[in-house]
Image (cartoon, rainbow, N blue to C red):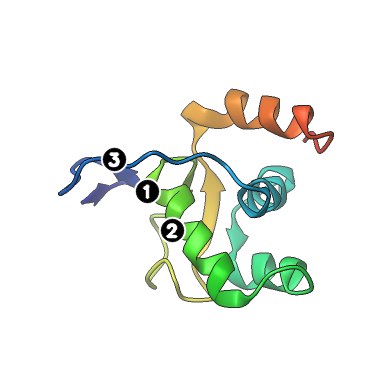
């Protein structure tokens, strides 16, 4: 269950998971933007590298692991191309370090 874009309840144990290249690519796009980013833009920027369903699957992973949040003003679900995302403020320093380590800093 989500409240204000943050997970407040999980119905299952959190599984082992680590960031992959697609996750880093998604985070780079979102983190470099001055404002929230539409899923449509993320798909367009990564469509030469990844399949749309794969991008959506990794958006869900990033949401579930609290790296990103969906904007609370959205009137659509997370998988809709009009859904908008931003990085979790509590994770931004960590995300910036990851992007810096990969030479893709903000």
Residue 98's image quarter?
top right
Position of the C terminus by quadrant: top right
Q: Residue furthest left?
A: 11
Labelled disc at residue 14: 3
Residue 95 percent across, percent down from the top left: 62, 32
> What is the x, y in percent for residue 47?
73, 74
* Residue at image point 66% right, 64% down: 42
- Binning the other alpha carbons within 10 Å of mark 3 as few (below 14), some (14 to 19) or many (20 upward) gives few
When the figure is inspected, residue 40 is found, relative to residue 61, above or below; the finding is below
Marks 3/2: CA–CA distance = 14 Å
Residue 60's tag is 2
Label located before the other in sequence (3 or 2): 3
Which one is in front, 47 or 13? Answer: 13
**Closer to the camera: disc 3 or disc 1?**
3
Circle 2 residues within 10 Å: few <14, some 14–19, many ≥20: some
- Does dot 1 land on a helix, a strand or a loop? helix
Image height of 32 relative to 103, above or below: below
Q: Secondary structure at mark 3?
A: loop
In the image, taking residue 4 as reference, residue 66 lies left or right, namely right
Residue drawn at (43%, 58%), measured in percent from left and top? 60
Of mark 3 and mark 1, the one earlier in the sequence is 3
Which residue is at the front of the view, 1 or 58? 58
State how many labels appear.
3
Q: Is residue 70 visible?
A: no
Q: Which residue is mark 1?
A: 64
* Percent position of residue 9, x then y: 18, 43
On the image, which quarter does residue 99 sit in? top right
Above or below, 54 against 86 in this view is below
């Amino acid at each position: 269950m989500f409240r204000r874009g943050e997970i407040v309840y999980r119905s299952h144990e959190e599984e082992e998971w680590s960031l992959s290249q697609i996750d880093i690519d998604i985070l780079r796009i979102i983190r470099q933007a001055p404002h929230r980013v539409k899923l449509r833009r993320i798909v367009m920027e990564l469509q030469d590298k990844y399949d749309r369903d794969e991008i959506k699957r990794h958006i869900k992973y990033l949401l579930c692991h609290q790296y990103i949040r969906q904007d609370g003003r959205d009137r659509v679900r997370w998988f809709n191309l009009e859904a908008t995302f931003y990085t979790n403020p509590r994770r931004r320093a960590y995300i910036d370090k990851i992007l810096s380590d990969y030479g893709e800093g903000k």
